[in-house]
Amino acid sequence: MHYAPRTIAFSAELLHPPTAPDPAPIQKLHNQMFGTGEPLYRSFTVTHQGAVLSNPVTRPGAVSSATFLADRCQFREELTGLTVEEFAARVIEVAEQVAVLRQLQLFLQQKITVRTLMNPRSYKDSRTYLGQGMFGFTDELEDFGRDPQLFGLRMVFPPKADEPNAYTLKIESFHNDPRSLFIENVGGFGPVVAANGLNSIADNIASTYDFVVERALAFIARFDLREEP
């Protein structure tokens, strides 16, 4: 069944051995970005936790930032319209420069998050889809004495021999729009040596996204059948 998923957020956390949260290298990176004429981030600020690069946003709830803490780099794009390829390219470009400026030799772990919305085709309300279509509930919820306003499913996929990464997948009804399903996939990946290049991080971002649009949507389609009259 064909769907039109709408990805609303990407994030990537690249963990590294703890270092002093010196903002000077990040400020230097910011200056270098402006030297190109097309900076990936337009603003530079310093918080008590570390330096932050960001872009101004006008849409409520939107975020476009890169935060550099003592033990990790955090990249967030929420409601900014970036594609998965654009987000991956941004992470790689900035992370490679930060690794040089902060003398980071190793990223110990990667945590990639993708959040997507989609509408079931046979159900007007995602709560009905989950409760009746997927879970097959009839009168079981009467035990609670009230109707739930949010349904959800959480599955954890541990590493295996040919896929050493892990995924944590959530499929829930969406409180802002009852027609939409909210899908979140968090991918966990192992270390990468900076000197060998960081392109594998882009592959991991793509894999986390593909797990949603290929595998999760195929799973959702199995239960997206026409409602009984």
Image: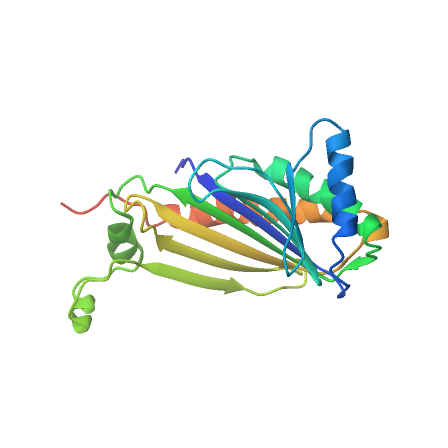
149 and 164: which is toward the camera: 149
Question: Where does residue 161 sit, x and y in percent of width and height?
Answer: 67, 63
41 and 163: which is toward the camera: 41
Whether residue 134 sits left or right of residue 85 in the image: it is left
158 and 116: which is toward the camera: 116
Answer above or below: position of 136 versus 101. below
Q: How is the image coloured?
A: rainbow
The residue under the point 62% across, 40% down is 87
69 and 140: which is toward the camera: 69
Answer above or below: position of 210 versus 141. above
Res. 198 in view? no
The residue under the point 64% across, 61% down is 49
Whether residue 95 sits left or right of residue 151 in the image: it is right
Whether residue 45 sits left or right of residue 139 in the image: it is right
The residue under the point 68% across, 38% down is 89
The residue under the point 69% across, 28% down is 38
Q: Where's the N terminus, which quadrant?
A: top left
Question: Where does residue 191 sit, x and y in percent of width and height?
Answer: 74, 60
Res. 131 in view? yes
Residue that protrudes farthest toward the bottom in the picture: 143
Quarter residue 167 falls in:
bottom right
Question: Where does residue 220 sit, x and y in percent of width and height?
Answer: 39, 49
Q: Where's the C terminus, which quadrant?
A: top left
